[in-house]
Amino acid sequence: MSDNKVILGSEEWCSFPELGIPTIKARVDSGAKTSALHAINIAPFIKNESNWVKFDINPIQNNLKTVIHCEAPLIDKRIVKSSSGFREQRYVIQTNLQIGSSKWPIEMTLTNRDSMGFRMLLGREAMSGRVLVDPEQKYLLGQPTSDALKELYKNSEKASSGLRIGLLASNPELYSNKRIMEAGEMRGHEMHFLNIKECYMKLDAKTPEIHYRGGKILNQFDAIIPRIRPSITFYGCALTRQFEALKVYCLNSSNAITQSRDKLYSLQLLLNHGVEIPTTGFANSPLDTDDLIKMVGGSPLIVKLLEGTQGKGVVLAETKKAAESVINAFKSLNANILVQEFIKEANGKDIRCFVIDGKVVAAIQREAMPGEFRANIHLGGTASIIKVTAEEKKIAIKATKAMDLKVAGVDIIRSSKGPLLLEVNSSPGLEGIEGATNKDIAGEMIKAIEKNFKLKQ
């Protein structure tokens, strides 16, 4: 029976003639049930009264200049839950796989595989009855040379004629940062990762400068995307201000980021713009703990450290005694604290609206782990698609404008009084929302920069 089967190693080169992909390296994995193909800019559409999907692919690993535009009949949509808890809706296509001299139809899911080592995963459903795998071997059917790859993809090179954009951040390996770099390069821009801690500046009335490691002067940038961690807000905003002094366009301004990081000031700003929030009290090591608790409607209530981020320094006090204990513990630190009414009916869920350039481009519902009230993805919360109401969209847009941000993650909670705003984040993460919605949020951020320069989109 094995005489008719194709023998493959653990890695092989294959092709998809109907998609216009002449060759692509695949991981042959009998441990995986379904096959998956790297895809970005995924969009369903109708063709000849049938459901189709179009998408882009960079078929060569670590090469973002080579792009193939594909389209295929859509046969299914599936919710896939990853090991990290993200629920991702994936489109499923069927197309012919060619490997060696053999060809047969297979089903594949489409997903962004940038963090994986291979653009293609060949699973056992696609191999069943046709393939034998020798895991100790690789490229049993041969592999193309670098020159052959260049020749095969010579008409797929994307010309670089865009802007010079710097991503001002701390960790180049972070999903969000990798996606922004990729999205900019995909759209033909020259992208540079600028590590905040390796930048230093010259303050001078006539010739202000920003230097990078080794004394390199950072000049001739068209735009900067600040992605500043809370722990480095002061220095990151100082750098952003220096870029602004050099007349460089910053996607979020230093002033907007600074005020969004001040929890108390940001809440006062939001209220001044007519945005509803949960009833909140603020104090510095309060003497009258009892009145502070009464001010927000009693227990249960939330106690927050003013400097806390990503759900850290946030405690649910279920009884008055617990609330007094937590407040007194924070008091011993001489800390600034917020106390806030607990919205029990939210049931550990909140809504994250991603706003870019005055428009809600995507929204997810974040749900806390069992026994947890904080829905932050960093704390094990899960993300799923949700349809937000017109009122929730209006609140998200109004809050972003109040903070003067171009890009923001706006967190909203559904209460018996209607939607209430929890927080506005100036450097929102992309992994949860892109994974759940399959939308190219990083690409939308780049488009916002292009719009400022009136580039053709």
Image (spheres, rainbow, N blue to C red):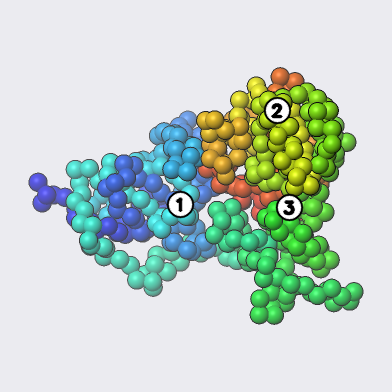
Label 2 vs 3, first from the N-terminus: 2
For the residue pair 301 and 132, the one nearer the viewer reads as: 301
Q: Which residue is mark 2?
A: 321
* 10 Å crowding of disc 2: few (<14), some (14-19), many (20+): few
Are the residues at dot 2 and dot 3 in contact (C-beta closer than 8 Å)? no
Of 372 and 445, nearer the camera is: 372
Give, as a three-letter code, the residue at label 3.
Lys
Please report contact status of discs 2 and 1: CB closer than 8 Å, yes or no: no
Residue at mark 1? 113
Q: CA distance from mark 2 to mark 3?
A: 54 Å
Q: What amino acid does circle 2 point to? A: Lys
Q: Residue, x 68% and y 30% (percent of image)?
A: 322
Q: Residue at x 83, y 28 (%)?
A: 291
- Distance, label 1 to label 3, CA atoms, is 28 Å
Q: Identify the residue under disc 3.
A: 451
Which numbered disc, 2 or 1, marks the residue that appears first in the sequence?
1
Mark carried by residue 391: none
Q: Nearer the viewer, residue 346 or 143?
A: 346
